[in-house]
Amino acid sequence: MNVEGNAGSYEVRPGDVEALADELAAQREAVRLPADRIAALGAHPLELGAFAEAYALRDAHAAAVQRMGQLTYAVAVAIGFAEEVARAVAAGYAEADEAAAQAYRSLANRAAGTVYTSRRGGLE
């Protein structure tokens, strides 16, 4: 998004917003590797011995691993939500751009008596 001076106008490029969404998708995928490693840590309880301190440490370790897994999952969900929002924003701006372009084509068609079907199309 570019802001032009103090006039309050701005420019949003849907492709740039899509690129942001792609980067967010990559970040979400990158979070999965640590999540898998964290899950592996909790798969087998630590065997530190048969005394109270060892049991307490094992339980604390299991609780920490569980909490880290929950936090990692929450981060992945938040990144996924941000990705969905970015894609929705990009689509909204692309649709608005196309609607504005269609309005200009309609005006041009009425003024010139020529029918332009689309920006990729041609004359009818």
Image (cartoon, rainbow, N blue to C red):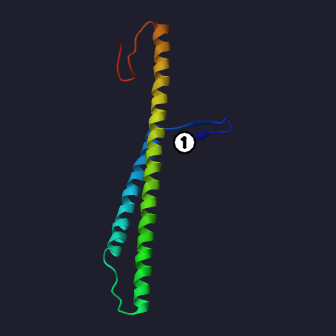
Q: How many marks?
A: 1
Residue type for callout 1: Met
Residue at 43% over, 55% down: 77
Name the element at disc 1. loop
Q: Nearer the viewer, residue 39 or 63?
A: 63
> In the rendered view of the protein, which quadrant contains the N terminus?
top right
Residue at 35% over, 17% down: 122
Residue at 43% over, 85% down: 57
Q: Is residue 9 left or right of residue 110?
A: right
Residue at 40% over, 77% down: 62
Residue projecting furthest to the top: 113
Q: Residue tagged by mark 1?
A: 1
In this view, 123 is above or below 7 = above
Quarter occupied by residue 53: bottom left
Residue projecting furthest to the right: 6
Could you classify mark 1 by the number of other residues whose Cα lies within 10 Å: few (under 14), some (14-19), or many (20 or more)?
few
In this view, 21 is above or below 122 = below
Residue 42 spot, x, y in % from top left: 35, 74
Q: Nearer the viewer, residue 122 or 55?
A: 55
Q: Nearer the viewer, residue 31 or 64?
A: 64
Residue 102 spot, x, y in % from top left: 46, 20
Q: Is residue 38 left or right of residue 79?
A: left
Residue 103 spot, x, y in % from top left: 49, 19
> In the rendered view of the protein, which quadrant contains the C terminus?
top left
Residue 64 spot, x, y in % from top left: 44, 75
